[in-house]
Image: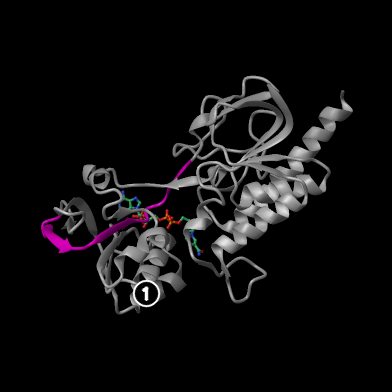
Amino acid sequence: MEHLDSIILGSGPAGYTAAIYMGRAGFRPVIYEGLQPGGQLTTTTIIENFPGFPEGIDANELMTRMRQQAETFGAEIRPLIAVKADLNAAPYRFTFDDGSEVEADSVIIATGATAKYLGLADEEKYKGEGVSACATCDGFFYRKKTVAVVGGGDTACEEAEYLSTLASKVYLIVRKPFLRASDIMQKRVKSNPKIEILFETNTVGLFGNQGVEGAHVVYRKGETDERQYDIAIDGFFLAIGHQPNSNLFLPWLKTDEQGYIITEGKTPRTVIPGVFAAGDVADSHYQQAITAAASGCQAGMEATNYLRSLRENG
Ligand code: NDP
């Protein structure tokens, strides 16, 4: 079995930043790209809140630059997904989707998080035929059409804004009587004439003979003025938060009730020595490119110290 001193699982801002720090400290970490090369940012458009880019930067370009920077400092990037882990004892063992196996002295888990769905049978039925969790990936197909975005957070507002540049009308379906998004995003969606916000509304089904043609929605479910009605839409976009990609590690690591990895205090250390968690997989709250990069930096520094002390102690 191949033995490596350090591996990084995931290729978002956390994974690349960890690699940059380890590379500059003289290590040559191997990054396993995982399910979504470049991470979740690659499904968005312009990043306006990553410091250093006053005009904003295309998200894919930002990730390409991070990747190049990691490679400049010696990281090797493998286009593989970890399918099995064994963290019982160091060195820690992993199997990848091509059947290859490695053991590593230190591991940085930066596997991120994946978009959630409502859990309706119709979401499965119409997946790829009108149902999507990525407006930037699929918005193009809805030029001059009507779409709905579900959710009231920053992601939902950003997706609604983005889709309004393509579609003729966007419904924003929000289950509460208010948005949870930041003030600036709330202002943008509320003042956008193409966006209609349906507060206190839940989706209970989708219909259509050739892909999605509409949604069954309920206003104020369970209240005396409950009302069920249909809206005609061509596309249905989910933006209701994320599920951390931590399943592989659940037998060994501490997680919260949603599955986010719990680390020691403000550090990226997990309960297993030499195993660190960084980025969205360990952050249910901030979930920003910049916070992911910052925790990747911490994980890279911790892994470097850990490997140095391993070497010093024989
Ligand atoms: P959030 O958890 O902030 O919001 C999720 C939204 O989906 C909430 O409105 C929630 O409703 C709703 N929701 C959850 N489950 C359901 C359900 N079953 N049915 C209907 N609605 C549901 O997730 P986001 O992905 O929007 O954001 C995550 C983090 O990333 C946040 O901290 C956000 O600020 C940040 N972010 C920042 C951006 C930026 O700064 N540019 C861009 C995108 C995200 P309820 O309020 O009722 O719980």
Residue 88 belongs to the span the image colors magenta: no
The 10 Å Cα crowd at callout 1, few under 14, some 14 to 19, many 20 or more, is some
Residue 30 visible? The answer is yes
Is residue 33 rendered to the left or right of residue 214? right
Task: Give the image quarter of residue 5.
Answer: top right
Q: Position of residue 76 (x, y in %)?
A: 70, 42
Image point (36%, 73%), residue name: 189
Q: Is mark 1 within 8 Å of ligand 1?
A: no
Image point (79%, 33%), residue name: 307
Q: Which residue is mark 1?
A: 165
Image point (37%, 74%), residue name: 165
Is residue 182 rendered to the left or right of residue 164? right
Q: Position of residue 21 (x, y in %)?
A: 76, 49
Secondary element at tag 1? loop
Give the answer, above or below, for where 219 lies relative to 37.
Answer: below
Q: Position of residue 188 (x, y in %)?
A: 40, 75
Residue 239 belongs to the span the image colors magenta: yes
The quadrant in which the N terminus is found is top right
Q: Position of residue 314 (x, y in %)?
A: 87, 23
Ligand 1 rendered quadrant: bottom left
The boundaries of the magenta stretch are 223-244
Residue 179 visible? The answer is no
Taking depth in this image into account, of 104 and 97 the one nearest to the observer is 97
Is residue 137 rendered to the left or right of residue 284? left
Give the answer, above or below, for where 204 lies relative to 145.
Answer: above
Image point (36%, 67%), residue name: 160
Is residue 63 rendered to the left or right of residue 220? right
Taking depth in this image into account, of 219 and 48 the one nearest to the observer is 48
Taking depth in this image into account, of 135 and 297 the one nearest to the observer is 135
